[in-house]
Amino acid sequence: MVLRRAPFQSIIAPIVYLSANLISRIGVVLVTSAVVFWIFLFPMTVRAEGAHPYLGILEFLILPIFFFAGLALIPLGIWLRVRRERKQGGAPTVFAPLTLQSPALKRLALFIGVTTVINLVLGSLFTYQAVTYMDSVTFCGQACHTVMQPEFTAYQESPHSRVACVACHIGPGASWFVKSKLSGAWQVVAVTFDIYPRPIPTPIRDLRPARETCETCHWPQKFGEDRLRIINNFADDETNSLTKTVLLMRIGGGRTGPGIHGAHLGPGVTIYYTPADESRQTIPKVEYHNTVTGRSTVYLASGAKAEEVNNLPTRLMDCMDCHNRPTHTFSLPEREINKAMAADDISPSLPFVKKKGTELLKASYGSHEEAAAAITAGLEGFYKEHHPDVYAGRRDDIARAAASLVSIYKRNVFPAMRVTWGTYPNNIGHMDFPGCFRCHDDDHVAADGKKIGQDCNSCHQILAMEEESPKILTDLGLQ
Ligand code: HEC
Ligand code: HEC
Ligand code: HEC
Ligand code: HEC
Ligand code: HEC
């Protein structure tokens, strides 16, 4: 019998026969159409590198799904047909004679060989591109435009605007890669069905420990140098009087002593803390351990009861507990206006511009467009009514100030995501949010009476405090 003499044919001939079924054919159609579309789209995505997130989603995520679904349908159709024929009394055991020399077989072998190679190449390209694309800033920041708009906007203005989202949110290594793809799959579902939270809650519960991500670029032992900070503050009066605060930040961690970084992350130091709630803004218990000195100290906030606090989950302090806004830095209206006025985007010689600007920024608007119109009209109206001479003579300055206010609003407030002033607390500092004073409040006390310190000069040397013309800046040639 033909079958027994040539086992090779006994495999191929049934495949030819069995693959002639609807499901396998749909599979073939899917695979070929996905490939044709993909080849057609490819030059566009290459040319417009990162320009259009939706094109990317189609090309790198949806087409590959069709491609692999098609690849899966072909054997599925064959298998279903075998099952059906077995049930109906067995598939034919003898097929039209097919020998190794027959041209039909050679053609089929060639066809299968060539398509397999092409499929392997395309399949791996698909996978590689999908993964690369999903790690791109375009995908993370723009594909779900409204959802990520607050973070993406702030990111573009930050010192990390050239650092990929995944460098902080995923970092190196396979296990976090897999975790991120799993939670990413859920996020895609949440966005598709519009069931995501607004605003996106912070802190992120399962963010990777910062030392594994931040320290791929920053090394705490290297910081060292103290850093000068000059903070300009314009007052609410008619002349917007300017005062300056000058701080020398004890960055630390290197040659100049432990400073801020060394105190929490230096060799041998680990600090665990127990937040009272998800937002980590109230901290009843802090544990300090130092394997170099062998000292361990447990601090309790004065109102906290040990037996209650001990049941709460603790957290190992890392970069994120202070730098929770390294790149999505949302600010407050007064601070933003101070910066814009210092940079002369808003002219400090416009009467009451600090006061009026802050008031306009703090009002509530339904959308960015509404805010832009209302802020511009509000500022112009104010000068027209109260300072007609200024309005007549300085139209350009007023327009420039209004444009700057609008851009401040658009950078910090996102009505669609219910993100407004102060929605996301910043833990660096202690003036706007509890920040450092969540622990350094002179109220966290150890059994031996030792406190987590609040000495003003341990974190920063205060070189000038709200002075009109600080001598230190003159000495340094900075004014
Ligand atoms: C320099 C590191 C860094 C980069 C780069 C970065 N992020 Fe973040 N991101 C953070 C940190 C830190 C948090 C706050 C984590 C916390 O408080 O638990 C955060 C929080 C978020 C949140 C939660 C909401 C919020 O504001 O707290 C979203 C959403 C987010 N990032 C999206 C992005 C996107 C999209 C990009 C790229 C466009 C990006 N991130 C780039 C560090 C980074
Ligand atoms: C892929 C590299 C990379 C990663 C990862 C990274 N950073 Fe940065 N970081 C940079 C670069 C580049 C700068 C800008 C340096 C400059 O402008 O001088 C910067 C600047 C900073 C600054 C100084 C900002 C300023 O105002 O001068 C801080 C603070 C900072 N990063 C914190 C973090 C934290 C916290 C993380 C982890 C969540 C992190 N970085 C992760 C590369 C990185
Ligand atoms: C205890 C809080 C705290 C922790 C923890 C912390 N930092 Fe900082 N970091 C600060 C403060 C405060 C500054 C100074 C900010 C300023 O100048 O206003 C700073 C400054 C920086 C700067 C800018 C340094 C410079 O020379 O300008 C970088 C970069 C930085 N931190 C990275 C990190 C990284 C990475 C980690 C984790 C390994 C980390 N920090 C952990 C509080 C912290
Ligand atoms: C989670 C609690 C916590 C937070 C938040 C925190 N610290 Fe600390 N800090 C500590 C502990 C604990 C010590 C060590 C106390 C000890 O020596 O037993 C410490 C020590 C220090 C020291 C060494 C001098 C001293 O007073 O002992 C500096 C400087 C410092 N922190 C700066 C900061 C700055 C700046 C911030 C905010 C950006 C900050 N810390 C936020 C817990 C915290
Ligand atoms: C635990 C560390 C720590 C202690 C203690 C501390 N500060 Fe600060 N302080 C900071 C940090 C961090 C910033 C933020 C610098 C920046 O803007 O990045 C800051 C900012 C400031 C500013 C500038 C405010 C602004 O408008 O931006 C002033 C003023 C100030 N501190 C005064 C004080 C005084 C007064 C004390 C003593 C009661 C004190 N600080 C104690 C860490 C500390």
Image (spheres, grey):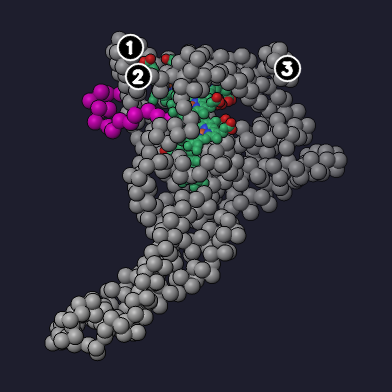
Left or right: where does residue 224 sit relative to residue 177? right
238 and 342: which is toward the camera: 342
Label 2, label 1: how many angstroms apart (C-alpha)?
8 Å
x, y percent for residue 366: 57, 52
Dot 1 crowding, Cα within 10 Å, few <14, some 14–19, many 20+: few
In-image side of 62 versus 84 (left or right): right
Q: Which mark is residue 293?
A: 1
Task: Say if disc 2 is inside 8 Å of ligand 4.
Answer: no
Tag in front: 2 or 3: 2
Q: Which residues are magenta?
A: 304-319
Residue at position x 42%, y 18% in the image = 263
Mark 1 residue CB less than 8 A from any atom of ligand 4: no
Residue type (three-letter) at the residue carrying disc 2:
Gly
Q: Using the rendered view, name the quadrant where residue 238 is placed.
A: top right
* Cα distance between the residues tagged 1 and 3: 42 Å
Which numbered disc covers residue 35?
none
| Residue that badge 3 annotates | 477
Q: Residue furthest top?
A: 448
Relative image position of residue 459 (x, y in whole percent): 50, 17
Residue 206 in the image: x percent, y percent? 35, 41
Q: Residue type at mark 1?
A: Thr
Work out which quarter of the rendered image holds the N terminus and state it.
bottom left
- Contact, mark 2 vs mark 3 (Cβ under 8 Å): no
Mark 3 crowd level (few <14, some 14–19, many ≥20, 10 Å Cα): few
Tell me if label 2 and label 1 are in contact, CB under 8 Å: yes
- Name the residue tied to disc 2: 268
Q: Please tell me which residue is depicted at 35% across the width and 19% down the height of the picture.
A: 268
